[in-house]
Amino acid sequence: MKQAIAKSADIPEGGRIVIDIPGATIGLFRAAGSLYAYENTCPHQGGPVCQGLLIPAVEERLNKDGTAAGFRFDPSDPRVVCPWHGYEFSILTGRHPGNAAIRLRSVPVSEEEGIVYAEL
Amino acid sequence: MPNSEFREPHITIHSDTREILANARRDIDRYGLRDYFIVDVDSHHVELDSWDEILTYIEDPVLRRSGLSMAEMWPNAKRLALSNHPPGLTFQDVGGRIPHQAQLAEHVDPVPGEHRDLTLVRRAMDSMGISLQIVFPQPMLEVGLHPNPDVENQLITAYNRWFTERILAHEARVKSMLALPFNSPEACLRTIREFGEKPGVVGFLVTSQRQAPVFRNDYMPVYRELEERGLPLGFHAGPDYSVGKQMNRFVSVHAMSFVTCNMVHLTNWIINGLPERFPRLKVIWIESGLAWLPFMMQRLDHEYLMRQSEAPLLKKLPSEYMREMYYTSQPMEASNMKLLEATLEAINAGTQLLYASDWPHWDFDVPGRIAGLPFLSEQEKRNILGENARRVFRL
């Protein structure tokens, strides 16, 4: 069932809201120009994953000879981190970067005339 | 227009424990936990928040005056004076990703006579459906690495007096196993005799990060005293930053050192025949997880069978003694459910395993962690979540 759940303006680029709707709590994220929605339940222990820190992926750079060259952030890979235990998920895919089988439950969303709709 | 209800979008150090653990409350209904007796055998409060108050409980007047002076005059010593707080502990929150590890800075309305920590403990218990909670300090668990054993003894005694007076005496749902000043067997005996019958004291604790070997002859009166009183002895693991000299990341230090300290003590405990010398003393291994146990069982059995003459007090295999000991469940490694099931079977989890949350630490486990295990029977779940603890601690 298609249901209006938020206004588009509530979620600016790089932002996030977490809303209670009948039967579920959903996190809405706008990243790389698109809107993503996930249930607020971590697949690990059920933590409020969508209420965690938003932070880019950390990558470790290597030199050509295999020596380590330090860490840096990768702004093209935005992440949300479950505040209970630190399980980290790509906002763009909903998957854990270390085990793609561990993934957030996605909620289909669309936008029309400034309103966000979810298929519930 | 949408009529959705907005939640706090970002959980921070200022969020209320009940908001942080709101999803745990759902497990209470999901698993029908309301009619379970749930005992959390390992949780924590932050004693450094009350450190300047604890310093006033130091018995030695000269040391007490030094500590209070440090707390007053040094810019950051109000929460650290005289302690050996390991600076690496601040890596635990994964760079701010797990805020409740760093601190619970939420608002608490002051209640006359009630310590703030007690309110926080109640909020956590109620959110997770926990009936009773055994509460420990945090950085004090590293006190066995203090460079001055006399200061260690004084701090442990001061903390024990403060905790029994300010926390344990005020809430029957809160219990503790108090730390022993383990570098002095005489002080251990004094501790057991002073606190053994205080309300809420259900056992005593060795903070495992220390160099003292448990087989020293002068510890035997301590074990005898605990055995005669029917009080369990716990070994609570902690991090060791000397391991960190060979490791460059906290994940490595934590993964190894929380286990290796208890590996050493458990090996000494069994090979020196302490289960034969004190057969009624209940021993609990706390916060090393579970995955190390099948390794230890196989490793010690394998070597013992070839070198029995070095452990002549043993009347059975090391693994058989291990099956008679107790273990707390957290952090329960569950990335391979077949191995987890085999581990729980190996340690007789139905009678020997004790649920622990370790709240508010970064790797805490909610009761649903146990309740959701598909290979346990209903009775085994009840035993692990609380009935085993009821028996061990005579609750």
Image: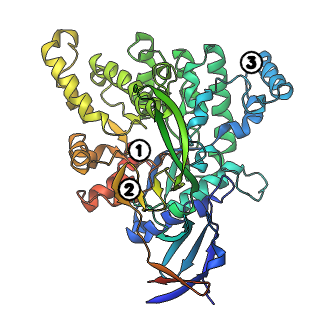
Q: Are marks 2 and 1 in contact (CB under 8 Å)?
A: yes
Q: Nearer the viewer, mark 1 or mark 3?
A: 1
- Relative to B7, residue B44 above or below: above
What amino acid type is highlighted by mark number 3? Answer: Asp
Residue B110, given in percent of the width and then of the height, sits at 78, 56
In three-dimensional space, the C-alpha distance between marks 2 and 3, rounded to whole angstroms, equals: 45 Å
Q: Earlier in the sequence, mark 1 or mark 3?
A: 3
Residue that label 3 marks: B60
What amino acid type is highlighted by mark number 2? Answer: Arg
Please state which of residues B23 and B250 is positioned toward the viewer in this rendering. Answer: B250
In three-dimensional space, the C-alpha distance between marks 1 and 3, rounded to whole angstroms, equals: 37 Å
**How dense is the environment of label 3, judged by Cα within 10 Å: few (below 14), some, or many (20 and up)?**
few
Mark 2 chain = B
Residue that label 2 marks: B369
Q: Secondary structure at mark 2?
A: helix
Residue A2, given in percent of the width and then of the height, sits at 46, 89
